[in-house]
Image (spheres, rainbow, N blue to C red):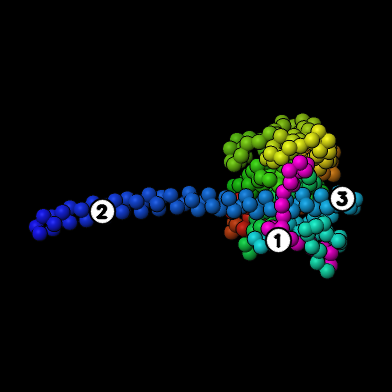
Amino acid sequence: MIASIVLSVVLVPVLLGAAAAWLLRRRDAWPGQVRGARASARRKELEAVALGLRAVAEGRAHSGRALPEVHAVIHSGQRLTLLLAGADAPASAPWTADLSGKEWWVEPKELTGPGNGVAEVAHPYSLAVTLGRHRGDRVLVDLARLPGAIALTGEDNDVRCLAQALITELISGPVGLLATVVLVGSAATASITDGLGARSARLRTAATRDEALACQDSMAWGSDRRSSAPQTVRQDSIALVTAKAHARRLFVVTAAQFRDDQWRDAALRDTDALLVLGYIVGADWNFQVNGDGSLDTGRLGLPVDTHAARLS
């Protein structure tokens, strides 16, 4: 009896200590697991967006009709919605147009990738990027549809962090496989590049405006695609030609460089976009990064209560 009592006195603290240590290890692991789960969920959302945009391109390629002008993409979890600049119906399958023809929607579960032996269809919305969330819904806008200078304004650190979030998604996410991002001059310094969450052949740097404009599209779709499906020579040729037609470039400059290098007069292509870090007079588009984490998109008119840099 005494021996049992002694054994219990010895074992109970040991077992309690072991349990406490296990709980501490689990507690330390939880933040990493939560971050991993959230990153995986965000990736799946972007994969659904990419599949949806490819379905738009594929449907219109088959029908011979022009591609719709996408104003914004909204992912609510259960539904993916395209907000169009104007009425455009009927929608490409599996998309469904509303009565106005200005909104298309699809459930993500209805979106599938190309089957074996089928060339992957490129889409022209590769500069579509997440601005943030509104009431939990992911809000994306195609920067290539915003002609002229897009100014990010606000506190320097907030502007830099949001720019890094936008660039990282474009060069590493599934939506921007045809996007090339060119950091120019002072925008290519460590203060920007060290905060990027990825490195990619689709990220370029240039010292001057002329050098930046001479940068060719990286054609990353051909080298980065993940599909293991067999491709024929003809299918690859068609896919690469389509990819070249849909390639897009985003130039990133500071406000000082925009003024000094006269970027307002730069000969940009219709498919290019220009992001300016800081305030400039007469910006075509102004996105104000607010201290509370929201983003005022100005005349673009898209509400964003948590900008992209705050999501991670």
Tell me the residue at 68%/45% (across/down): 174
**Residues under numbered marks 3 and 2 in contact, where contact means CB atoms less than 8 Å apart:** no
Nearer-the-camera pick, 207 or 305: 305
Tell me the residue at 71%/34% (across/down): 223
Q: Which mark is residue 62?
A: 3
Residue 117 picture quarter: top right
Alpha carbon separation for disc pair 3 and 2: 68 Å
Q: Secondary structure at mark 3?
A: helix
On whether residue 56 falls in the magenta region, the answer is no
Q: Secondary structure at mark 1?
A: loop
Q: Label 2: which residue?
A: 15
**Residues under numbered marks 1 and 2 in contact, where contact means CB atoms less than 8 Å apart:** no
In the figure, is residue 25 to the left or right of 68? left
- Up-down: is 238 above or below 13? above
- Type of amino acid at the residue the image marks with label 2: Leu
Q: Which residues are magenta?
A: 100-120
Comes first in the chain, label 3 or label 2: 2
Alpha carbon separation for disc pair 1 and 2: 50 Å
Q: Residues within 10 Å of mark 1 (few under 14, many from 20)?
A: some
Q: Label 1: which residue?
A: 107
Q: Looking at the image, which residue sits at the far left?
A: 2
Q: Looking at the image, which residue sits at the far bottom?
A: 99
Q: Position of residue 288 (x, y in %)?
A: 68, 55
- Type of amino acid at the residue the image marks with label 3: His
